[in-house]
Image (cartoon, rainbow, N blue to C red):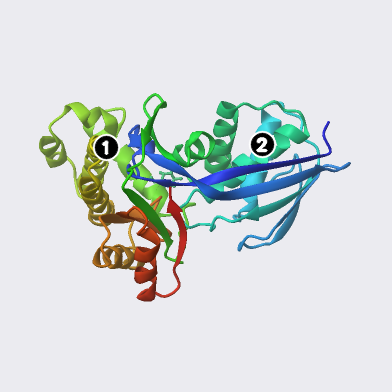
Amino acid sequence: MRRRATAHAPGRINLIGEHTDYNDGLVMPIALRLGVTVEASARDDAIAHLVTDASVSPPEASYEIGSETRDRTWVDRAKGVTAILARQGSRVGGFDAAITADLPIGAGLGSSAAFAIALLRALSELFDLALDDAGIVRIAHAAENDFAGARAGLLDQLASVYGRRDEALLIDMRDHAMRSIPLPRTAELAVIDSGTRHEHAGGEYNRRREGCEAACRHLGIASLRDLDERPLDTVLERLPSPLDRRVRHVATENERVRQAIVALEADDDARLGDLLSASHRSLRDDYEVSTPELDRLVELAMAAGALGARLVGGGFGGSIIALGQRGRAKDLADRVLQRYRGGHLVAVVP
Ligand code: GLA
């Protein structure tokens, strides 16, 4: 048994394909350089003791492995991880974990998944669990869903484990088939945190997901991906409001992902930008997951010359991505942030 182990997992942006993952749809994440690091060391008792420098509350917590109970804080993700490991027969002893994050937390950039994955990697090494990537994705996702209570899809976990910094990863959530798509050579993305935070667990996120499930029952289909083969207008006519708008977002977003692939392959940055902006409008008007702050950031980015911009991640706060010409994204973000208080530039991608 190792006495010490350190592991890192990255956050992500998603170029396009938002709120499609739990609908068997298409997503296109890119891993960030920023992420979460866990330094763990084994203890002789059964206590998990966690400390973090991230701006989360509480900064320090302890619990007994085998007696995990939810407290509705970030610690639930660690409790979920150790409880699920125990349930599957992996032997985990007590440990101290120091968690550092250079990724903003709760900013729609996959920080929860990055934390669970970094912790799983550190524990796998510390206790010789030999977890493979697929197992890490599965357990991190279950910790979020079964323990933390956010019925999130698999986007963040797959992006953190398989994503690359210099390519977009097209994932078909129907069968998890993955394909690398080169990023534009003449454009880059500014990732701007609005400074406002989302709360996924038990909130609007889960309600959107329930809406999609209700629409499927209404239409007699297994998932909204089954709409690929049907004329959208006739489908939407059969749905009550707001389910019609929710479904329109998901179906048109999948189509925008397909068109984004074409735009990327044709080096058509202007077209890609238009698709990002169309995605934002759809998330704002049809899926209703934007906020005044995110809309304002998108508007400011367009006024500053962005080719396109949209909220990224689940919404209800968090961050936007803005597409600008190569070498110009930082300048673009600076101009946006001169007119918006409380935000900051998180990264320029790639
Ligand atoms: C959050 C969830 C993901 C995905 C996005 C929206 O990040 O964790 O599973 O649903 O929102 O695309």
Whether residue 149 can be seen here = no
> Is disc 2 placed on a helix, strand or loop?
helix
What residue appears at the point 55 percent right and 27 percent down from the top-left corner?
A: 134
Residue type marked 1: Asn
Indicate the quadrant of ligand 1 in the picture: top left
- Name the residue nearer the viewer: 296 or 238: 296
Q: Nearer the viewer, residue 42 or 4?
A: 4
Quadrant of the frame with the N terminus? top right
Instruction: Decide which of 243, 328 is in the foreground and name it.
Output: 328
Quarter-of-image position of residue 224: top left
Which x, y percent locates residue 268?
Answer: 22, 43
Q: Which residue is mark 2?
A: 121
Is residue 118 among what the camera can see? yes
Q: Which image quarter: residue 215?
A: top left
Left/right placement of residue 190 relative to residue 33 reads: left
Q: In the visual, does 78 lie left or right of 350?
A: right
Q: Residue 40's x, y, as percent? A: 76, 44
Q: State the residue position of label 1.
A: 254
Residue at horizontal 33 percent and vertical 65 percent from the top: 297
Amino acid at pointer 2: Arg
Q: Position of residue 184 (x, y in %)?
A: 32, 43
